[in-house]
Image (cartoon, rainbow, N blue to C red):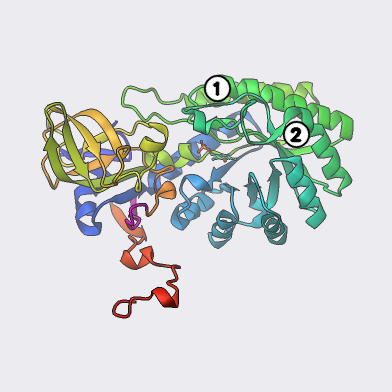
């Protein structure tokens, strides 16, 4: 698991050239550390792989994986466009310098005032239902519209992240897609794309091939019946990364080669012209760039278990509790020490589900040790909360031995922000 941006320097964990122990000391814990180089590498790997197999490929970064402005800026510099899912993310994207026509909005259960905001900002709109389309067309005509088609095939690392298939709330059922494009065209929309996003944490190409077969069949129908020329075909995000030390990395070159040759062939058979091919990964670009540092404050044992109590909980990183997700854990200052003991690594939240890892073999831990939770760059900070009234952690960006704070740690006052105490309940002494 110790591979770039991680490094073992005399038993101590370095991230992109910076000592993790030093960062923990300087910024306190829990602390998210993001490697700029790793993000740029992942983007280039994917963009290059796509460009090797199709003439016009585009990568949209899915901002919800990690929406820090500095991360959005890095990917903007690389040339990424953006996949966003809320008006807040549109706002962040514009703030980070993305052009509205480089932003694709894919909402679900979208309100009318959100639709109005999207029209005002002139971002591209990917519709999730015919209801949304009809309400949108009453408010205005988007410059470019696509339909998120549910190709009835989904995949993912947990049932909560499968986003297509009969039991999914997402997208327009494939049998209804033609009607949606018809209404959009009659409503005055002139530029079109087509979209799917089937799930998250997918490690094999097969579900993409099965789903895109159906997606492109829908595209063919729409093209033949309505004469719609698709400017892009968006295959969604969902590319997985290896979270476990014994897990193989996705063979990206092979994956993209197989998927793209299939797509090229279908585009040709169905006479779909020369649409751009888009993918919109979140996890793949940022997960491995991130490490969460947390400090052991309590060691305790029962007759059957040893616990390492740390200062990060499911308020800090939710994936283990939410999905039973595995994050590899290492003792950041004891990389060369033998793993001699099994620990449950648990957080400070008053719920039994607040377990970051169970039965992990680690070196003998002591109170004060720094623990690193790996592959925490995606859906880590962006899913954090103030539950139990704990301020959210800081984020630091590292780059080849340099580091900068990119999000200040929240303070106690952030816990009260926005709260209002009615006059009659005020404490005369304190507030
Ligand atoms: C979340 C999301 C993505 C990114 O998913 P990853 O698994 O992080 O790649 C892409 N597209 C849409 C519409 C999403 O909601």
Residue 392: in magenta span: yes
> Label 1 crowding class (10 Å Cα cut-off): few <14, some 14-19, many 20+?
some
Residue 65 vs residue 315: left or right? right
Residue shown at the point (39%, 73%) measured from the top left: 425
Farthest front residue?
424
From mark 2 to mark 1, how far is it between C-alphas?
23 Å
Residue bearing the label numbered 2: 274
Residue bounds of the magenta highlight = 387-399
* Labels 2 and 1 touching (C-beta < 8 A): no
Q: Is residue 251 left or right of residue 361?
A: right
Relative side of 175 to 225, left or right: left
Q: Which of 424/175 is in front? A: 424
**Residue 360 place in picture, x, y as percent:** 22, 29
In the rendered image, the quadrant that contains the C terminus is bottom left
Asked if the stretch drawn in magenta spans residue 185, the answer is no
Residue at the disc numbered 1? 205
Q: Secondary structure at mark 1?
A: loop
Residue 146: % across, % down: 73, 41
Is residue 115 rendered to the left or right of residue 88?
right
């Amino acid at each position: 698991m110790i591979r770039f941006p991680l490094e073992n320097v005399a038993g101590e964990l370095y991230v992109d050239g910076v000592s993790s122990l030093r960062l923990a000391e300087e910024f306190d814990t829990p602390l998210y550390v993001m490697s700029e180089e790793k993000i740029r590498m992942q983007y280039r790997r994917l963009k290059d792989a796509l460009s090797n197999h199709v003439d016009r490929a585009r990568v949209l970064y899915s901002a919800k994986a990690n929406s820090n402005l500095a991360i959005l800026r890095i990917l903007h510099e690389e040339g990424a466009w953006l996949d966003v899912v809320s008006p807040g993310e549109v706002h962040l994207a514009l703030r980070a310098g993305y052009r509205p026509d480089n932003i694709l909005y894919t909402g679900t259960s979208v309100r009318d005032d959100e639709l109005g905001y999207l029209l005002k900002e002139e971002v591209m709109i990917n519709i999730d239902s015919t209801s949304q389309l009809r309400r949108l067309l009453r408010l205005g005509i988007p410059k470019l519209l696509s339909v998120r088609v549910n190709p009835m095939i989904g995949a993912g690392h947990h049932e909560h992240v499968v986003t297509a298939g009969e039991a999914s709330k997402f997208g327009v059922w494939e049998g209804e897609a033609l009607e949606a494009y018809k209404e959009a065209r009659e409503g005055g929309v002139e530029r079109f794309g087509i979209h799917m996003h089937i799930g998250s944490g997918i490690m094999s190409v097969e579900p993409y091939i099965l789903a895109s077969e159906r997606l492109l069949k829908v595209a063919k129908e729409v093209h033949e019946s309505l004469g719609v020329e698709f400017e892009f075909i968006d295959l969604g995000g969902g590319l997985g990364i290896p979270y476990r030390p014994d897990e193989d990395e996705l063979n990206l070159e092979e994956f993209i080669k197989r998927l793209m040759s299939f797509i090229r062939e279908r585009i040709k058979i169905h006479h779909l012209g020369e649409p751009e091919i888009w993918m919109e990964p979140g996890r793949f670009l940022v997960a491995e760039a991130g490490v969460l540092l947390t400090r052991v404050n309590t060691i305790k044992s029962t007759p059957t278990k040893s616990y390492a109590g740390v200062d990060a909980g499911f308020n800090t990183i939710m994936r283990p509790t939410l999905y039973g997700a595995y994050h590899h854990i290492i003792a950041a200052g004891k990389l060369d020490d033998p793993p001699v003991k099994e620990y449950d690594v648990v957080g400070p939240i008053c719920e039994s589900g607040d377990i970051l890892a169970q039965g992990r073999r680690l070196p003998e831990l002591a109170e004060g040790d720094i623990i690193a939770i790996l592959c925490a760059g995606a859906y880590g900070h962006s899913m954090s909360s103030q539950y139990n009234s704990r301020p959210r952690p800081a984020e630091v960006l590292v780059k080849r031995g340099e580091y900068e704070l990119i999000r200040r740690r929240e303070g106690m006052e952030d816990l009260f922000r926005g709260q209002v105490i009615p006059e009659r309940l005020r404490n005369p002494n304190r507030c």
